[in-house]
Amino acid sequence: MDSSPHMIFDSSLSSTRARLLVLGDGNSIFRGLRSAEEHGATKRLFFTSPDEIYEEEYYEEQLPEKKRRLTPDQVNLLERSFEEENKLEPERKSELARKLGMQPRQVVVWFQNQRARWKNKQLEQDFDRLKSSYESLLADHAALFKDNEGLRLEKLSLDPQLKSKDAVEATKQVSVAHTGSSNAKPSSMWTPSEGSSAPVLSEFTDGGNYYVPACYASPAYFFGGGEL
DNA sequence: GATCGTTCTAGCATTACGTCA
DNA sequence: TCTGACGTAATGCTAGAACGA
């Protein structure tokens, strides 16, 4: 039996806990639990494979600080890789880590954070789009409301004239009925044009001017926007 | 085939640190 | 030099998928 001190990784722990670093000869085991709590969260503590302990040692030699910003070159390559595919397969993770001189764990973390940043940007863009769409609809609504109000007032002003005209027509019809004429038609009935069974455009004109409902004639209806 | 334990990763919230005005 | 705001690397946790026993 080999009694020399050695290190092994205990695979019995879940991945959410840091791995146990097992030191000793296999019988008398010293287990150094690499957890942030245990170390007062002052050190980055992550090993995920036996290889990575060497990477970690290398990493710590390179950076005395607790936290180091990535270099522009590292960020560039990560961003290009992220644009190609925002998910990280194990092979790509290892390859990127090797190329960039980073820990695989750092690459994973960068992708996670980048996905979060990307999602935030998407949310902001969606919000802006919805906001401008809402403002446009609001302006349309205000324009339609204003036109509708104008038409309502116009109708109110015309009502007395219509009533007096109807009264005259009613008087005429009473007179016609009394004399027995069969050519007269009630004025309220629509009269088709010659050879036509449906109203034609000219019947919605007045001296060459078309009657177009005001709401459809409003620039706001067609182009949206604008304060009223 | 169903179940269980392990491993890995995504997603999310949060913390800790670096930078800059 | 100090400080607060902001960006970002890293951590902690949960859930789910994949895989082997």
Image (cartoon, coloured by chain):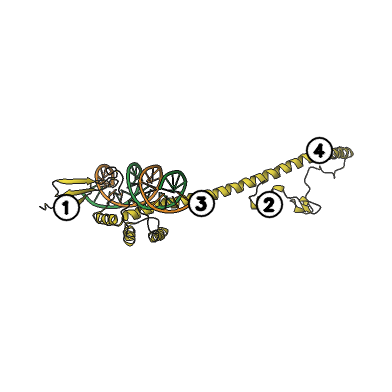
Chain colours: A yellow, B orange, C green
Residue designated by label 3: A125
> Of label 4 and label 2, which has the lower sequence position?
4
The chain ID associated with circle 2 is: A
Question: Residue A29: which disc?
Answer: none
Question: Residue A160: which disc?
Answer: 4
Marks 2 & 3, CB-CB < 8 Å contact: no
Q: Indicate the quadrant where residue A68 lies.
A: bottom left
Question: Residue A6: which disc?
Answer: 1
Horizontal and vertical percent for residue B9? 34, 52
> Of label 4 and label 3, which has the lower sequence position?
3
Label 2 and label 1: CA atoms lie apart by 82 Å
Amino acid type indicated by mark 2: Pro
Residues indicated by labels 4 and 3 sit on the same polypeptide chain: yes
Q: Is residue A87 above or below residue A165?
A: below
The chain ID associated with circle 1 is: A
Q: Nearer the viewer, mark 2 or mark 3?
A: 3
Q: Residues within 10 Å of mark 3 (few under 14, many from 20)?
A: few
Amino acid type indicated by mark 4: Pro
Looking at the image, which residue sits at the far left?
Answer: A1
Label 4 and label 3: CA atoms lie apart by 54 Å
Residues indicated by labels 1 and 3 sit on the same polypeptide chain: yes
The chain ID associated with circle 4 is: A
Query: Is A193 positioned to the left or the right of A126 in the image?
Result: right
Q: What element does badge 2 sit on?
A: helix
Amino acid type indicated by mark 1: His
